[in-house]
Each structure stands twice: as C-alpha cells, then as structure tokens.
C-alpha cells in the first residue's frame, strides 16, 4: 500500500511544529553565544605580506662550453619559484628561529603547533606571499606574523648566500683550473714556436727549394739546348772531316829544293842542268784537317760534359722534388699542430677571460 502526502499536507505539518522548531533554533543561538563570549577563548588573525622579486642575472658570452653551461645553470639555481618560497615558510629551521626570537616555550609551542598556526598563500597573478597567523593572543599573533616574515627573509638570504659562496668557491676552483690550462697551453705553444724546424723555418726552406728547383729546371732546358747545338756542330764537323785529306801531297823538281840542290850539286860537280828533269813528291800535314780534328775532339768532350751535366741536373731535380714533397708533408703536419695548439690557447684564454669578466 502506497502512502502519498500532498504539499499542502506537508506545509500543515510544519506549521503545527513551528514553535518547536523556533525554540530549538533560539536555544542553539543562545548556547553558541554563551560559548563564544564566556566559554571559548577568542581567536585573532595577524597577516604579513611579502613581495618576491626574482634576481636578474646575466651571463655574458654564452656559448656551448662546459663553463658557460655551468654559469647558466648557476644563474637558474639562484632564482626560486613562488611555490618554493611558499613551501619554505614552514621550514622547521625558520620556525625554530621564530621560537628562539620570541623566547617561546618549546614544549608548548612545538614546531608542529607553530606550523598549524600558519597559513601561507600566493594570490593569483602576483608575486606576493601572504602569511596568516591564527592565535588567541592578538599581540602574539602579530609578533608571530612579523617574526616569521623576518626570519623567512633572513633564512632565504642565508640560503642564497650559501649558494653564492659555494658558487664562488666553484668559480675560484674553475678559475684556477682555467689559469692552469691557459699556462699549459701557452707553454706548449711557445715550445712549439721555438722548435728549430718550426713552421716559419719550414716555409723558408720550402720557398728556397722551390727557387732551387726552378733554377735547376731552367738550367736543364738551357743545357739541353746547348747539347743539341754541340751535337749538331759535331755531326757537321765529322761530315766535313770525311771530305778533307789528312795530308797534302806536292810535286816539285829537285832543283827547287834548296837543301837537296846543294847536296846534289856536289855529286854532279855543279852541273845543275842535270837536276832539272828530276821530280819528287812530298807529303805535308794538312793544317785544316788537324784543326778540324781538334775541334771535333773538343766538341766530343763538350758533348760528354753536357750529357754528364744533364744527368746531374736530372738527379738534382728528382732529389729536390723529393725534398719539396717531404717538406710539404712536414709543413702540413706542423701547421696542423700549430692550428690545434692555437685553438687550444684561444679556448683557454676565452674561458679564463669569461670568468674574469
């Protein structure tokens, strides 16, 4: 069986018990008032507001070096978020400072009880931190709010100072390391420059060898031209020599030779007419033949000397070319070492200067 009650009937029931409802409400209000004014201690709130300003730290000369990455991370660690600041307000170290500053009984005011008195909030879209202290003593609530704010600022400053001191120590160690790296790089670069066969020496030697090679090649060309001319002259001389007789044959009467004529005069009792019909042949050395032969022999000696000279020049050219190639390799290696040492020195100097800046 279902029972139904209309709205009208419900209102009638409430009206019938209105005196009871009103009485209960009045009694509750009276009890609440008596408890608030005569039984319960009053509660007061004290408020402290702080403005958080993040430090602006600029790191100059940022690049990809390990030092610059460290400096960048250092600047980030010195900046804390508002939530971090908010969570630090109830830090036990801060509350212990507050308790000592106000000379509060540690048994009555424990860290937990002090923490329960504190409410921390960050208003939206602000850099503010609000600290609210709830306590029955209005003066103590105000003192707690002010002291918590003061000790919070001091604690944050102390922590920041510690981080800065640690960072300074790290930077000092880094500075010492970079100074040592700079000195080592400078010493190594100086030793390299003072080597006997340094880059400057090898460059001069290379230039001298190039000049020598050019002179040898020029001399070789000129010597080959001279050899060709001498060979042509020698061939022409040998050809001409074949057409010249080494001796000259002459025919004359006995009377034309004074020495023989005097000798024969005694034999023929001075009758020179008897000598007129007597003929004789004589051979004389051909001076032209001898002169040409001497020139040919001289040309042969010259050709031989020129051929030997060409052989020597070719050997000198090959030797000099090999020396130039060796110098090129050594010079390239030295330049690579110099560039590496120069880059190391520049990097060490840049890192050192960046710390000192």
Image: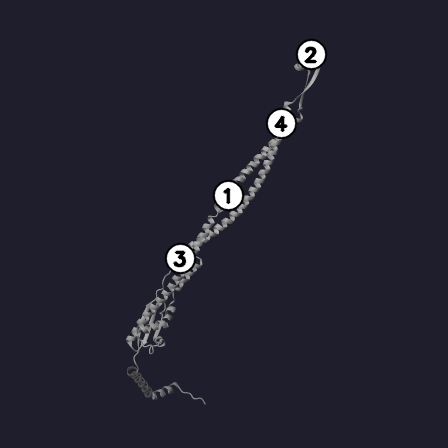
* Residue denoted by label 4: 294
- Badge 2 marks a residue whose secondary structure is helix
Report, in whole angstroms, how far the alpha carbon at label 1 lies from the one at label 2: 88 Å
Q: Identify the element where label 3 is drawn.
A: helix
Q: Residue at label 1?
A: 205
First reached walking from the N terminus: tag 3 or tag 4: 4
Compare marks 2 and 3 and give the one earlier in the sequence: 2
List x then y, in percent, for residue 140: 29, 75
Rendered position, 194 above or below 293: below
Which of pointers 1 and 2 lies earlier in the amino acid sequence? 1
Q: Nearer the viewer, mark 3 or mark 1?
A: 1
Q: Which residue is mark 2?
A: 266
Q: Nearer the viewer, residue 47 or 59?
A: 59
- Please name which of the two marks, 2 or 3, marks the residue nearer to the observer: 2
Figure disc tally: 4
Residue shown at the point (58%, 38%) measured from the top left? 312
Crowd around label 1: few <14 · some 14–19 · many ≥20 (10 Å): some
How far apart marks 2 and 3 lie (CA) works out to 130 Å
Label 1 or label 4, whichever lies nearer to me, is: 4
Q: CA distance from mark 1 to mark 4?
A: 46 Å
Secondary structure at badge 4 equals helix
Disc 3 or 1, which lies upstream in sequence? 1
Dot 3: few (<14), some (14–19), or many (≥20) neighbours within 10 Å?
some
Q: Is residue 304 visible in the rendered structure shown here? A: yes
The Cα–Cα distance between marks 3 and 1, rounded to whole angstroms, is 42 Å
Residue in view at x 40 percent, y 57 percent = 355
Residues at circles 1 and 2 in contact by the CB criterion of under 8 Å = no
In the foreground, 88 or 183: 183
């Amino acid at each position: 069986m279902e029972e139904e009650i209309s709205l009208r009937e419900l209102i009638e029931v409430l009206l019938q018990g209105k005196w009871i409802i009103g009485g209960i409400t009045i009694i509750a209000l009276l009890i609440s008032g008596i408890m608030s004014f005569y039984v319960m201690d009053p509660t007061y709130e004290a408020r402290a507001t702080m403005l958080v300003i993040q430090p602006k730290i600029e790191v100059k000369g940022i690049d990809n070096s390990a030092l610059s990455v460290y400096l960048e991370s250092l600047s980030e660690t010195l900046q804390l978020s508002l939530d971090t600041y908010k969570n630090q307000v109830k830090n036990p170290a801060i509350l212990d400072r507050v308790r000592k500053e106000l000379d509060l009984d540690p048994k009555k005011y424990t860290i937990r009880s002090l923490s329960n008195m504190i409410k921390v909030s960050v208003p939206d879209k602000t850099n503010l931190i609000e600290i609210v202290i709830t306590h029955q003593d209005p003066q103590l609530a105000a003192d707690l709010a002010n002291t918590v704010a003061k000790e919070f600022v001091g604690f944050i400053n102390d922590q920041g100072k510690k981080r800065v001191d640690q960072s300074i120590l790290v930077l000092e160690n880094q500075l010492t390391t970079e100074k040592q790296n700079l000195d080592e790089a400078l010493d190594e670069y100086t030793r390299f420059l003072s080597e006997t066969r340094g880059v400057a020496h090898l460059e001069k030697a290379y230039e001298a060898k190039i000049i020598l090679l050019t002179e040898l090649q020029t001399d070789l060309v000129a010597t080959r031209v001279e050899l060709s001319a001498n060979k042509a002259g020698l061939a022409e001389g040998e050809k001409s020599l074949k057409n010249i007789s080494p001796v000259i044959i002459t025919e004359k009467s006995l009377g034309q030779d004074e020495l023989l004529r005097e000798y024969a005069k005694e034999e023929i009792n001075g009758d020179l007419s008897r000598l007129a019909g007597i003929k004789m042949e004589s051979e004389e050395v051909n001076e032209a033949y001898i002169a040409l032969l001497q020139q040919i022999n001289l040309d042969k000696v010259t050709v031989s000397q020129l051929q030997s000279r060409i052989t020597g020049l070719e050997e000198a050219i090959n030797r000099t070319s090999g020396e130039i190639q060796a110098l090129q390799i050594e010079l390239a290696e030295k330049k690579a070492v110099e560039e590496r040492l120069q880059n190391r020195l520049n990097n060490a100097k840049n890192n050192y200067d960046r710390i000192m800046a």
